[in-house]
Image (tube, helix red, strand yellow):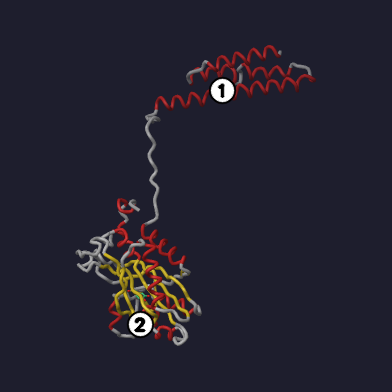
Amino acid sequence: MQEQLNQIKSEFETEINNVDSFKSLEQIRIKYLSRNGIISSLFDKLKEVPKENKKELGKVLNELRDFAVNLFEQKKSEIESQTLLSTSKIDLTLPAHTIKIGSKHILNQTLEELKDIFKSMGFSVFEGPELESDYYNFEALNFPADHPARDMQDTFFINKKFLLRTHTSPVQIRVMEKMRPPVRAIMPGRVYRNEAINARSYCTFQQVEGLYVDRDVTFAELKGTLVSFAKQYYGENLKYRFRPSFFPFTEPSAEMDITCFLCKGSGCRVCKNSGWLEILGCGMVDPNVFNYVNYDSEEFTGYAFGMGIERIALLKYGINDIRIFFENDVRFLKQF
Ligand code: DAH
């Protein structure tokens, strides 16, 4: 019996190895594995063998059948994949498509760089709401009601009391309401202005606000901090200047300029022939602002500053139209 089984096994093996089509494969299935096939019929013999040999024989037959079925399935998938290759239009020799990987938007990269620089100088990061009340956006920042200074910023009003914040300065008030000095914070966020859209201005952009309040904070420290920031961001050889300016919430106030990226200082249309471009506003916190948040202006002094992130990036990369940041043209985006 064992001899007979070995014979069947090796014949099956030889035959299945010669198979090269579904048709011959099917013939083998019928011959060996169908209901009346050679292997299935062997099981009928089980009835005839003596009881004590049944178990042993059953085991051998099962093994033979499993062996045959496995080999059969293997051959079947071999033939299937060969047919697929020869009939399909797939050209496996073609090079693969390269996968395009996205990157962080240049404005987010810029914001992260600014945060890193200020964090390294001991500033924490806070945020405030974009929908703001008149009180935080104007009044507590020392813009009196009906004062013409409110016209410095064209505002989107929601109603009489609420508006889209025109700058991140209101977050200064929110932070001071919650904390006692020393306060050393930057406050990044989106702001909105009801301005005509052109190469220089857009209806929404982002700012980073800065505030430091403690005993004996001086204007010299404000300059030192901003110069250190600007050199870390634009490079050690940066040329800069501070000009007197006006903001209702700082006294004295100033603006910081750096050399024009285009003409390097000799004067061109971008810098209106001055050779300088403004990068931020700053100043010493006005004592009136401290009154709104119950800080004693005899005890504490502080400085504040605010800059537009788009503008900061624009000047670094020599971009001459702010609108390009918002168009999401991949030809622009992928350069960063
Ligand atoms: N909020 C001002 C603006 O949007 C920028 C600014 C100027 C912020 C001076 C300040 C500051 O904190 O001290 O134009």
Classify residue 116 as left or right of residue 273: right
Residue that carries the numbered disc 1 in the rendered image: 72
Q: Position of residue 26 (x, y in %)?
A: 52, 20
Q: Is residue 164 visible?
A: no
Residue 205 shows which numbered tag?
A: none
Going 77% across and 19% down the picture, which residue do you hit?
Answer: 53
Kindly tell me whether residue 21 is visible in this rendering. Answer: yes
Q: Residues within 10 Å of mark 2 (few under 14, many from 20)?
A: some
Of residues 147 and 246, the one nearer the viewer is: 246
Crowding at dot 1, Cα within 10 Å, few <14 / some 14-19 / many 20+, comes out as: many
- x%, y% of residue 146? 30, 85
| Circle nearer the viewer, 2 or 1 | 2
Q: Which residue is mark 2?
A: 251
Q: Is residue 308 left or right of residue 269?
A: right
Q: Nearer the viewer, residue 113 or 2?
A: 113
Ligand 1: does it lie within 8 Å of the C-beta at label 1? Answer: no
Say which residue appears at 32% left-offset and 71% top-offset.
256
* Nearer-N-terminus badge (2/1): 1
Element at label 2? strand
- Residue 72, x across and y down, in percent: 56, 23
Residues at marks 2 and 1, CA–CA distance in whole angstroms: 90 Å
Looking at the rendered structure, the kind of residue marked 1 is Phe
Check whether the beta carbons of the residues at disc 2 and disc 1 lie within 8 A of each other: no
Determine whether 282 is above or below 231 in the image.
below
Q: Would residue 56 be found to the left or right of residue 149 on screen?
A: right
Residue 302 occupies which quadrant of the picture? Answer: bottom left
